[in-house]
Image: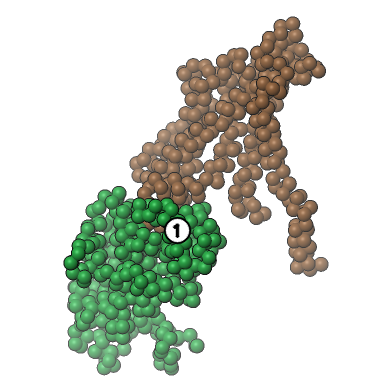
Chain colours: A green, B brown
Amino acid sequence: MQDGADARAPILEVANLRTWFFTDAGVVRAVDGISFRLHPGETLGIVGESGSGKSVAAKSIIRLLDEPARIVEGSVRFRGRELTTLPESEIRTVRGAGIAMIFQDPMTSLNPVLRIARQLIEAMTAHGTFTAAAARVRAATLLGRMGIAAPDSALNSFPHQFSGGMRQRVMLAMGFANEPAVIIADEPTTALDVTIQAQILDLLRALNADLGTAVILISHDLGVIANLCTRVLVMYAGEVVEEGAPEDLLSDPRHPYTWALLHAAPRMDQAVEGDRRLTTIEGQPPDPRAWPDGCRFRARCPFAIEQCARHPELLAVGAGRAGCLRGHRPGGHRAREEHGARRPRYRRRRARPA
Amino acid sequence: MSGVELALQTAEAHASAAGQRRRWLRRYGLAAAGAVVILAWALAAGFAPWVTPYPPDEVNVAGRLAAPSAAHWLGTDELGRDVLTRVIFGARTSLAVGFVVVLVGGVFGTLLGAVAAYARGWAEEALMRATDLMFCFPPIILAMAIAAALGIGARNTVIAMLVVWWPKFARLARSLVISQRSQDYVAAARAVGFGPVHILLREIIPNAVGPLIVLVTLDLGNAILVFAGLSFLGLGVVPPTPEWGSMVSEGRELVSQWWVATFPGLAILTVVMGFNFVGDGLRDWLDPHARRR
């Protein structure tokens, strides 16, 4: 970014991105027209159920997907530079150095036969940012910063000598090795147990605060995202259906899918009283090879009306956006529910006794 | 006795030093024996001029076809040359040819297969069809044809063998790289910004090297056998270079002078079996499933 540029200029801007898989069984439209902006130092969460396209969206940003996946439309601009059309040799200079990525399973994301030192040092020398000697010194510092005790002996270890949490710390060290401007964390805590999860999230938060690295956190867990992010995207069926601040989203969801997602998760702060039950979302997510016309959540939505057969735009609602025809209108489903005019027809199941 | 007690006793027996030695012997005894045999042959070949009693080409027509004796432990051949000397010198050719063919063919085939598997698409397809084509012919027949076309001589025979040798390594390397390329660590390496050359050579191949080493070792015996076979058929070395295959060939009609053909034959047998035992041992050692038994 040039000096004097608007501090609020986005560092990453994704516009109308479509990533489709051209398989023998048909075209899977995994990511189907998503747009969002990420500002420097921001923490953006992407939430959605399995198959909603969040991982594919993340991988599309640094073009990690191979055939049969193809970015068929849209743009990804990083520091004003278009990434979708960059030659492979140049996108490589962005990966790791500009935008780094952390994966879900730390047990398999490290090379099993190479020592930690070599993996970390080579990550740093790959972009010529550091000399081998400087990288060696920095590797130990980084591991220490990631909360690994005795970083020097850790450097000489093989991945299998570490626990999952330790490995994810090593992955974070790799991710932050070249001081990227953006780090994409694709479900970084899903494979870890709850206490380690919290530690890793705290670490990510601290790194974001200290280094100013913008974070895109992908998760299916709204709690994880609310914990860390200043803004949330909700994805469903390859689209963004709602965007907003986590507090607004949690207290006042505008899209029925977000609403349903919230009600499908147990909450610590809400006692399980007689009538309070967990709801499931009726039906299955639609087939990504043939998304339904109109609103893609329509078939599962208890609030659907005839007009939902028209595809809804993502419209500004309050401080965020929502892609529901009725979400922003007086007399929409929220109003109805508040007045008790109609209870949603989600199937109800009894919450487990505490 | 309860099952627990039995298990404990078994564990104790295994923990004892004698038990451990027995288990090690059962698993790696043959491999160790093979290694000793190969080492002995390698030393003999390396120090051939010093450990042999006669020069390899010293002709002594008066003492031709002499039976094994104190002067000639393994007897003499049709030209009165010492069989022991020629068998030891023959190890030089056999071992050298085996290593050259397997290492050069192995490295070339591995790189080709690995690159093709990582590149995918038409490169992979073309390579696989090429190896299919090579596998259509029995390797020794194909090598014979090529060696015959190139002319007799050790160098041409080695070239002929290399032509038929790389496909199996290309096949194995391809399958190993395919099983590795979709691993998470490869995606992670790409996300760090590594290029395909680095990922293939520094990340994937170190993960695939175990089975390749096993194949190399098992194949050394095989290469020596094929070269001896080609020499036996008259395509290998130019006489009077001592070579096991051609020595067997020279002695094959001398029924009553059995030593002329038998000893070089035994030499081939011991070296090939030695490499096979070492290869099997390496495979067991590198395969965690077999190791846990």
Can you tell which quarter of the image residue A20 is in?
Answer: bottom left
Q: Quadrant of the N terminus of chain A?
A: bottom left
What residue is at 55 percent from the left and 18 percent from the top? B235
What residue is at 38 percent from the left and 38 percent from the top? B126
Residues B222 and B100: in front is B100
What residue is at 55 percent from the left and 46 percent from the top? B210
Can you tell which quarter of the image residue A335 is in?
Answer: bottom left
Can you tell which quarter of the image residue A63 is in?
Answer: bottom left
Residues A245 and A214: in front is A214
Horizontal side of residue A18 vs B151, given as left or right: left
Horizontal side of residue B212 vs A342, given as left or right: right
Residues A4 and A68: in front is A4
- Estimate the x, y position of residue A79 in percent, counting from the top left: 23, 62
- Estimate the x, y position of residue B108 in percent, counting from the top left: 46, 35
Residue position marked by numbered label 1 in the rendering: A137
Residue B38 vertical position relative to residue A319 in the rendered view, above or below: above
- Estimate the x, y position of residue A39 in percent, counting from the top left: 25, 70
Horizontal side of residue A214 vs B276, given as left or right: left
In the image, farthest residue toward the top: B62
- Estimate the x, y position of residue A90 in percent, counting from the top left: 28, 51
What residue is at 41 percent from the left and 42 percent from the top? B115
**Mark 1 chain:** A
Residue B36 visible (yes or no): yes
Residue type indicated by callout 1: Val
